[in-house]
DNA sequence: ATAAACTTTCAATAATTATTGAAAGTTCGA
DNA sequence: TCGAACTTTCAATAATTATTGAAAGTTTAT
């Protein structure tokens, strides 16, 4: 198998997985392609390799930059822009976690807190159940949050392995 | 605000969040409704409350049962089926994590291992970069896996809080 | 100031995914 | 065995989301 074939298989699968997680296929594919390439690529190169329109590459590239998964690079003597992935996988994961937290966890937390602050009218037992749910979900999200904190601090594996042992 | 209004707001938001994570809106809404109700509900009641067709409720309910987030219940003297959510939030989370691991992490792991086992032809430096990426992603997924293990073992909060302190 | 090189935008369109609802299937009491 | 009560299926349709590509916008060298 040639390297190019392997890259393309990786790009395809990454796209499919991304889709399942609510990330546009093209965005995930572009990301995979840049990850697989040590050297930075131009918009044209990306368009050509994964057969996407200029607009699509442009928009998704911008989004990847928003997520801090990709950054622009200029090449000496070249006018066009080049793009490289964040190649450090841990840093990449950190950025993904933080972005999703900000985009999806925060809004739920706000809803939960808002609903918890309301005085509700209705059947008492049902109200208690509902408010209990709100609290449990809130606690749960906080735990998730803490878990991600732990994880982000795991620069080296020492504590990590120790913890696993402790818990087993 | 009445309890019913609060429930509906919760249902709506849960649906939106679900969507962002690649879960069908209706499925997330049904789940939220069942979570919010202490008592089990029939298909009809769900249809009525969130305005969904019978087919939709049926299909998504089945999926929720596959995910082990909901289970059927029969009521004495009633012919129709009733449904209740898994009300234990930790158990719920566990089921979601396991299901997603099985559905989305495993396929990636298989791809990575397959690509790592291939002998690649092409530029040596690029091949090294690519194989390095495969390895790092593989390691990363294993870490995720271990992290979820740790978390699933956290029945009570004691170790958890201790760990956070250690890491801080 | 001009024009070539390059990037961005966004309305139109395509592709995908979710939903409907009516018909077929099942279960069960009489 | 019948039929009412209920559940399931799935082709058709609707809704949503992603993608295109051409035109407008921007930058830069001369």
Image (cartoon, coloured by chain):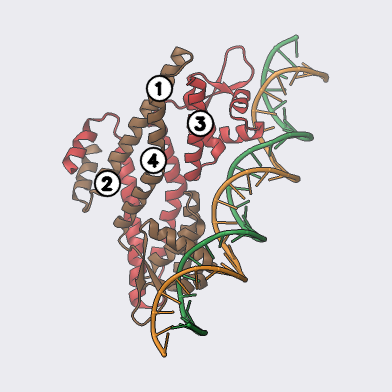
Chain colours: A red, B brown, C orange, D green
Left or right: where C30 falls relative to A30 = left
In the rendered structure, the answer to whether residue C1 lies left or right of residue C7 reads right
Label 1: element kind: helix
Residue sitting nearer the eye, A96 or C17:
C17
- Crowding at label 3, few (<14), some or many (≥20) Cα neighbours within 10 Å? many
Which residue shows up at 50% across the image and 60% down it? B26
Q: Are marks 2 and 3 on the same chain?
A: no
- Label 1 crowd bin: few (<14), some (14–19), many (20+), radius 10 Å: some
Kindly identify which residue carries mark 3: A11
Q: Does the residue at mark 2 contact the one at mark 4 (Cβ under 8 Å)? A: no
Q: CA distance from mark 2 to mark 4?
A: 17 Å
First reached walking from the N terminus: tag 4 or tag 1: 4
Q: Is residue A120 visible?
A: no
Q: Are marks 3 and 4 in contact (CB under 8 Å)?
A: no
Mark number for residue B131?
Answer: 1
SS state under label 2: helix
Circle 2 residues within 10 Å: few <14, some 14–19, many ≥20:
some
What residue is shown with label 2?
B151
Disc with the residue nearer the chain's start (2 vs 1): 1
Note whether B112 is above or below C5 in the view shown.
Answer: below
Identify which residue, A142 or B85, lies in the foreground.
B85
Q: Quadrant of residue A99?
A: top left
Residue A165 in sight here: yes
Image quarter hosting the C terminus of chain A: top left
Whether the residues at callouts 4 and 1 have beta carbons within 8 Å, the answer is no
Q: Which residue occupies 43% across, 50% down? A: A106
Number of the label disc, if any, that sits on residue B105? 4
State the separation of the CA atoms marked 4 and 1: 19 Å
Q: Is residue B143 above or below residue B52?
A: above
Host chain of mark 1: B
């Amino acid at each position: 198998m040639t390297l190019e074939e392997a890259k393309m298989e990786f790009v395809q699968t990454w796209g499919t997985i991304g889709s399942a997680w609510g990330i546009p296929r093209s965005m995930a594919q572009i990301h995979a392609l840049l990850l697989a390439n040590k050297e930075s690529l131009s918009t044209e190169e990306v368009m050509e390799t994964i057969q996407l329109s200029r607009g699509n590459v442009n928009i998704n590239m911008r989004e990847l930059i928003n997520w801090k998964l990709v950054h622009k690079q200029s090449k000496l003597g070249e006018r066009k822009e080049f793009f490289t992935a964040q190649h450090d996988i841990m840093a990449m994961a950190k950025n993904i976690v933080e972005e999703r937290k900000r985009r999806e966890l925060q809004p739920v937390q706000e809803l939960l807190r808002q609903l918890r602050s309301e005085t509700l009218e209705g059947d008492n037992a049902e109200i208690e159940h509902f408010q209990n749910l709100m609290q449990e979900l809130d606690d749960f999200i906080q735990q998730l949050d803490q878990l991600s904190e732990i994880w982000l601090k795991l620069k080296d594996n020492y504590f990590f392995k120790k913890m696993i042992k402790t818990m087993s």
